[in-house]
Amino acid sequence: MLKVLLVDDEAPILNNLNRVLPWKEMGMEVAGMARSGMEALRIAEDEQPDLVLCDIRMPVMDGLTFIGKLREMGLTSEVLLLSGYQEFDYAREAIRLGVKEYICKPIHYEELGHKVREIGAQIRSRQFKDKLYNSIPLFQEAPASGEPSVRKTPEQLMSQAQQYIKEHLNMDIGIEEVANQIGISSSYFCLLFKNRFAMTFVEYVTLQRMEAAKFMLASSDKSIAVIGAGVGYQERRYFTKVFQKQVGVSPKAYREEAKRGG
C-alpha cells in the first residue's frame, strides 16, 4: 500500500478527501491528516508518505513552505496541490519544489481520483525501477588527489541531477554540465540516468519542460512567450511546435481547455 498524507486547514475538505476517494481500491492508505504545515511535517517525518495532497493557502505555514521543508528533510514524496490560488509566482515555486499536479478548488473529486491513480502508477513504476538501478555497482571514478573520498549511491546522484535539472529548466543544459555538477563522468551519468528514468537525458528534460509549461499555462495568465522562455524556449514558435508534438495540442488550446476545467 502506498502511504498518503492529506493536508488542508479546512476540516470539511480534509474529511471529504479521506472519505470520498476509494483509497483501498487504489492501493493506498491515508497515513495521516493535518490541518497545518507544522502538523503535517511531524506526520511526514514519522510516516514517510509516498503521496501528499496539500492545500497552498494555510495559516502559520503555507503549503509551499511545508513542501520546501519536506524536501529539506530529504523526502521525495509526490505532491498534488489543492487550491484556487493561481498566482504565477506560486506556480513557479511549486514547479521548483517538484509538485506533481495542481487541482483547483472547488474540487472535482472524479478528476482528482483520476490524477491520484495516475500518480500512484508513476510512484509504483519508479519504485520498481529504483530496485533495478540500485543494483548497479558503484564504479564511479576515484576523487582527485587531496579530495575526500565520499561515495554516493546511484539514488543520491540521480536525485542531485534531478534537482539541478528542475532548477535550470529555463537554461540550455547538457549532459556534461549536469555530470560535472554532481561529480561523475558523462558516461557513468548516462548509464545511471537511463536506468533510473528509462529515457534519454534529452527526452527527460523535454518532458520536464512540458510538464512545467502545462502547469504554468493552467495556473497563470502570463503570455505563452513568457512561459516558453521560462522553460528554456526563447522562440515562441519553436516552443509551440515542441509543445504540440509532446502534448498533442497547442499551448493556447491547452490553456483554454484547462480554463474550462478539462
Image (cartoon, rainbow, N blue to C red):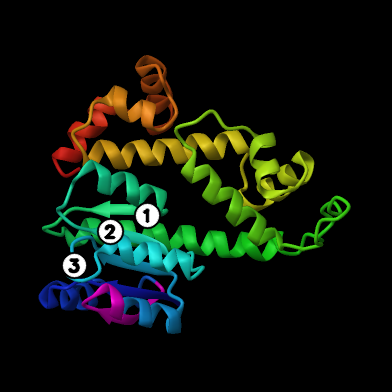
User: x, y percentage for residue 208?
Assistant: 46, 41
Number of marks present in the image shown: 3
Badge number at residue 90: none
Label 2, label 1: how many angstroms apart (C-alpha)?
7 Å
Image: 83 above or below 10 = above
Q: Which residue is mark 1?
A: 99
Residue for point 26% across, 72% down: 7
Instruction: Give the side of residue 6 with respect to residue 48, left or right.
Output: left
Q: Quadrant of residue 250?
A: top left
Q: Quadrant of residue 16?
A: bottom left
Q: Amino acid at mark 2?
A: Leu
Q: Which residue is mark 3?
A: 58
Residue for point 81% across, 60% down: 138
Label 1, label 3: how many angstroms apart (C-alpha)?
17 Å
User: Decide: marks 2, 3 in contact (CB < 8 A)?
Assistant: no
Q: Please say whether residue 92 is visible from this viewpoint.
A: yes
Which quarter of the rendered picture does the C terminus lie within? top left
Instruction: Give the side of residue 77 with respect to residue 214, left or right.
Output: right
Between discs 2 and 3, the one toward the N terminus: 3
User: x, y percentage for residue 235?
Assistant: 39, 16
Residue for point 48% across, 45% down: 166
Q: Which residue is mark 2?
A: 81
Q: Which residues are magenta?
A: 27-39
User: Decide: marks 1, 3 in contact (CB < 8 A)?
Assistant: no
